[in-house]
Each structure stands twice: as C-alpha cells, then as structure tokens.
Amino acid sequence: MVNVIKIDKAVRKYVVPLFGEYIRGRFAAKELISVGDAGRMLKQAWQLLNGKFGTGRITSLRLELNPFRKIAIDSEDSKKMIISEKFEFAATHTLWNENFPARRILRSSASAPIRPATAITIWLKCR
C-alpha cells in the first residue's frame, strides 16, 4: 500500500513540471497539443514515476482533460492508449409515429442505406 500523500508529492515533483514545460513550449510556439502528444507525455510521466513508491507499482496512468474526456495507458511499454469520452443527452425521442401504419415505419427504418464514408462505430462502456 502506498500513502496518497507520497503519490501526490511525486506527481507534483516529477509530472507537473513535465507537463508545464511542454505546454508552455507549445504555447510559445503557437502549436496545438495533440492527443498523441498527451499520450507521449503520459509515457514520460510513467518513466519518471517508476520506482518512486517502494514496493508499489504503477498499473495505469490517466489524464483527465475535462470531466468528459480521458486518455489512459495501462503499461509503460504499451503501444496503445485508451481514449474515452462521455456523452450525455436527453433520450426523449420515440421511434414510433402514430400518423404512419406499422408497416411503413418498419420499412422506412430498415431501408435507410448506410454509407461507408459516413458510418461511425461507437463502443460504449457502461457502468
């Protein structure tokens, strides 16, 4: 078990300066920070924190960009990063229209073509 205060001190000592320096440099150069840049900074943060917690070891690092968007890595040498985004919406729509007979509703909803250029695959992780 690792004391949260020890984790906080290590992150403030090693990771905050890493992110601060990188962000200030990109801002001064008038360059945007990409998702890939954020993933690379997480990997660097992992290297900086590795071994700083005695017998405790890092199992994942996550950067919360805002309450709805996160980037995570699950190992130091991982070649992938996990990007998650949460969407909230009001689901008050109905698929049924009382003005149409049932046959027309089913036919119109099933016959709409899906164009490969506009199709999006979304994987949802539910709690």
Image (spheres, grey):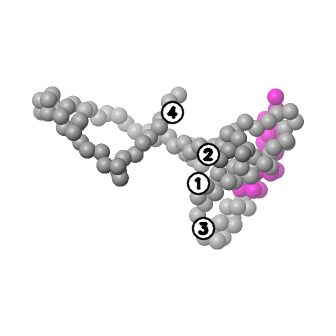
Tell me which corner region of the image, top left, top right, bottom left or bottom right, holds residue 5: top right
Mark 1–mark 2 contact, CB under 8 Å?
A: yes
Per the image, the residue denoted by label 4 is 125
Sequence-first disc among 2 and 4? 2
Image coords of residue 97 (percent x, y): 18, 32
Of tags 2 and 4, the one toward the viewer is: 2
Q: Amino acid at mark 2?
A: Met
Q: Is residue 110 left or right of residue 28?
A: left
Mark 2 Cα shell of 10 Å, populated few (<14), some (14-19), many (≥20): many
Nearer to us in this view, 116 or 109: 116
- Residue 16 lies in the magenta stretch: yes
**Sequence order check, earlier mark of 4 and 3:** 3
**Label 3's element?**
loop
Tag nearer the camera, 1 or 2? 2
Disc 2 versus disc 4: distance between alpha carbons?
16 Å
Q: Pointer 3: what residue?
A: 31
Position of residue 72 relative to residue 94, above or below, is below
Q: Residues within 10 Å of mark 4 (few under 14, many from 20)?
A: few
Of the residues under marks 1 and 2, which one precedes in the sequence? 1
Q: Which mark is residue 81?
A: 2
> In 3D space, how far apart are the residues under numbered discs 1 and 4 (Cα atoms)?
20 Å
Image quarter (top left, top right, bottom left or bottom right) of the N terminus: top right
Chain part drawn in magenta: 1-19
Q: Identify which amino acid the numbered label 1 is placed on.
A: Val
Instruction: Please name the residue that numbered disc 1 is placed on.
Output: 35
**Residue 68 in sight in this render:** no
